[in-house]
Image (tube, helix red, strand yellow):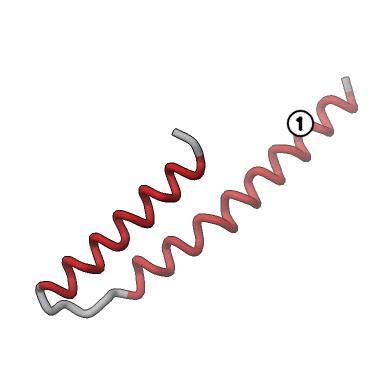
Amino acid sequence: MTTASIEARTLTLARLERAAGQAFGCEQEGASASRLTLVGPTTIALATFATALAATISYLI
């Protein structure tokens, strides 16, 4: 799966969850929305660290 298809699937599932909650009269929970926003920064931080580590190892070898 590409990044775009993963993001599209995530957004579709979030919309479906929100619609189901509204249909049953449940209020939207803040935990779901905040969890989605933490995925991006965490992923970027890990990718940056991995890139720096790979560059350091390449330089030392």
Viewer-closest of 57 and 47: 47
At x 35% / y 75%, what residue is drawn?
30
On screen, residue 5 above or below 38:
above
Taking the image as shown, residue 5 lies to the left or right of residue 56, namely left
The local secondary structure at tag 1 comes to helix
Taking the image as shown, residue 31 lies to the left or right of residue 1, namely left
Q: Residues within 10 Å of mark 1 (few under 14, many from 20)?
A: few
At x 49% / y 44%, what residue is drawn?
4
Picture coordinates of residue 10, whole percent (x, y): 37, 52
Viewer-closest of 34 and 7: 7
At x 34% / y 66%, what residue is drawn?
32
User: How many marks on residues?
Assistant: 1
Screen quadrant of the N terminus? top left
Q: Residue furthest top?
A: 61
**For mark 1, what is the residue?**
54
Screen quadrant of the C terminus? top right
Taking the image as shown, residue 22 lies to the left or right of residue 15, namely left
Viewer-closest of 46 and 27: 27
Picture coordinates of residue 35, whole percent (x, y): 42, 63
At x 76% / y 31%, what residue is drawn?
54
Residue 58 figure quarter: top right
Picture coordinates of residue 34, whole percent (x, y): 43, 69
Taking the image as shown, residue 24 lies to the left or right of residue 36, namely left
Q: Amino acid at mark 1?
A: Ala
Residue 55 figure quarter: top right
